[in-house]
Structure formats: structure tokens, C-alpha cells
Image (spheres, coloured by chain):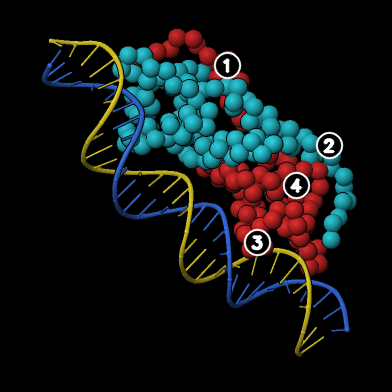
Chain colours: A cyan, B red, C yellow, D blue
Amino acid sequence: MEQRLDEAVSLYRALGDETRLRILQMLVGSEVCVCDLAGELEIAQPLLSHHLKTLREAGLVQARRDGRWMHYSLDPEVVEGLGGALSKLASDHRERGAPDIKCC
Amino acid sequence: MEQRLDEAVSLYRALGDETRLRILQMLVGSEVCVCDLAGELEIAQPLLSHHLKTLREAGLVQARRDGRWMHYSLDPEVVEGLGGALSKLASDHRERGAPDIKCC
DNA sequence: GAGTTGTATCAAGAATCGTTGATATGAGAG
DNA sequence: CTCTCATATCAACGATTCTTGATACAACTC
């Protein structure tokens, strides 16, 4: 539980940046190499590399070297897991929703 | 699209903190007043208030005043919406997944 | 009204994160 | 082996964000 919470925090933190969300959107459907990411997102190369590292460390993406090029791809299980956890939170809330539990 | 991205960023940023995730877990199922939150989470009162403000501004929770007490509750639609967006990302990825789109 | 209680805001220090430029690594080309 | 290219790491700065203590506000009690 503690560990899950920590993991969730690092996932959400990784998602909490516009550049990184745009990277994830570009990765939907297929592997993309860093050069293509750099072409579309107009940011400095070391910065892109840094954001990719954040996504990698959170487990949201995977990297694969192909000669000189690095290809990044989405890990759909991690994304799905997080989405499912949020949906579960919402449905648990609606189910357990006892209308009038007051506390004070 | 731009606006959605910004909104998503602020939601994920709000979720990217252990204390705030614990608050959300406590809010599953029923309204909780600040005094109860303060009792369980062992943090200073102004800090709790600050985290609640962050959650409020992101739209994840709603506040209701009842006399001297403030009661906070989850907004399940926002949570569900975000969970659905993540799940959609994952399923889009698996569907569109053309196996060999190389770029470089 | 004055006092008390629950919560929010403010100001300031500490820690973290995003950004940049310089440099390093790793792999193919010549 | 050297050169070049794609990407990663490092060091430093600026900007947010977390945290704390002091204070303000809002509502109830007396």
C-alpha cells in the first residue's frame, strides 16, 4: 500500500508536465525515435532527454536502442493500470457513498 | 485540445503528492470534515489547508461549509474522466499499434 | 459585545523541478 | 583510428512547490 502510493505519486508527477503529456500522445500507436520527438516538440535536445528519462523512470515508457537511434514506446499496461485505478476510485466512491455520514 | 492538456496537467500535478492521494482515499465514499482529515493525516493544519486548496483548484474535490466546519467531498466525474482518458490512451495505443512504423 | 474554535491566508525558508549550455558516451562512416 | 552524429549526463540557474509559524477570518457560545 505504501509502495503503491509512492509508485502512484511518481507516475502522476511524471504526467504532470505539458511536454511529457505531448510526448506520450506522440507515442500512442507506435514507437518513435528521439529525433522525431525533437522535430515536433520544439525544445532543446538535453531537455527532451531529461523528460524522457523522467517518463522512463516512472515506467510509463520503454527505450530501445537501434544503432545510433533510440526508440521510445508506451507501456500500455502501466497507463491502463493507472487509468483503472482512477476509475475504481470513482466507482468505489459512488458505491460506498453512504449519503449522510457526518463527522463533526 | 490545448485547454484539455493544461487541465490534465493541473489534475496530474494535484495527484502527484502523497498527502493529497491519502486525502482522496479518505474521501472515497463520503464527505469528510477537515478536523477528521487533520486527525488521521498527521500534518500541520495550514499545510492540510494548502493541500485541500490544491485539490479544490484542480477540481478534484468540492468544499461545503456547515457552520464552523468545512466538509470536503470527491468529485467522481472528474476522477472518472481522468481515468477514462488514461484507459483510452492505452486502448488507442493497442489498436493503432502498427507493428513496424520506423522513423529513422 | 468578548472569547473560543475551526479553517484559510500570508510571508518566508527549504526543497524540488524545469531549463540551459557545456561536455560525455556510444555507434556507425570513412 | 578519427570523424561525425544521435543521445545522455552534468552543473548551474531560475522558477515552482512544500512546509512552517504567525495571523486573519468566520461562525458559534457566553
Please say if B46 is above or below D12. below
Q: Both on one chain, marks 2 and 3?
A: no
Residue A95 got which mark?
Answer: 2
Looking at the picture, do discs 1 and 3 lie on one chain? Answer: yes
Could you tell me how far apart the alpha carbons at marks 4 and 3 are, in whole angstroms? 17 Å
* Dot 4: element: helix
User: What residue type is disc 3 on?
Assistant: Ala
Q: Chain of mark 2?
A: A
Residue B94 got which mark? 1
- Closer to the camera in the image, B61 or B37: B37
Circle 4 crowding by C-alpha within 10 Å: few under 14, some 14–19, many from 20 = some
- Marked residue chain, label 4: B
A35 or A12, nearer to the observer: A12
For the residues bearing labels 1 and 3, Cβ distance under 8 angstroms: no
Q: Earlier in the sequence, mark 1 or mark 4?
A: 4
- Amino acid at the residue labelled 4: Met
Chain identifier of the residue bearing label 3 in the image:
B
Q: Amino acid at mark 2?
A: Glu
Which callout, 2 or 4, points to the residue nearer the camera?
4
Residue drawn at (75%, 47%), measured in percent from left and top?
B26
Q: Quadrant of residue A10?
A: top right
Q: CA distance from mark 2 to mark 3?
A: 32 Å
The residue that mark 3 highlights is B44
Residue highlighted by disc 4: B26
Left-right relation of A57 to B38:
left
Rounded to the nearest whole Å, what is the CA distance between mark 1 and mark 3?
45 Å
Q: Specify the quadrant of the image occupied by residue B104.
A: top left
- Classify 10 Å Cα crowding around label 1: few (below 14), some (14-19), many (20 and above): some
At which x and y percent is residue B87?
63, 26
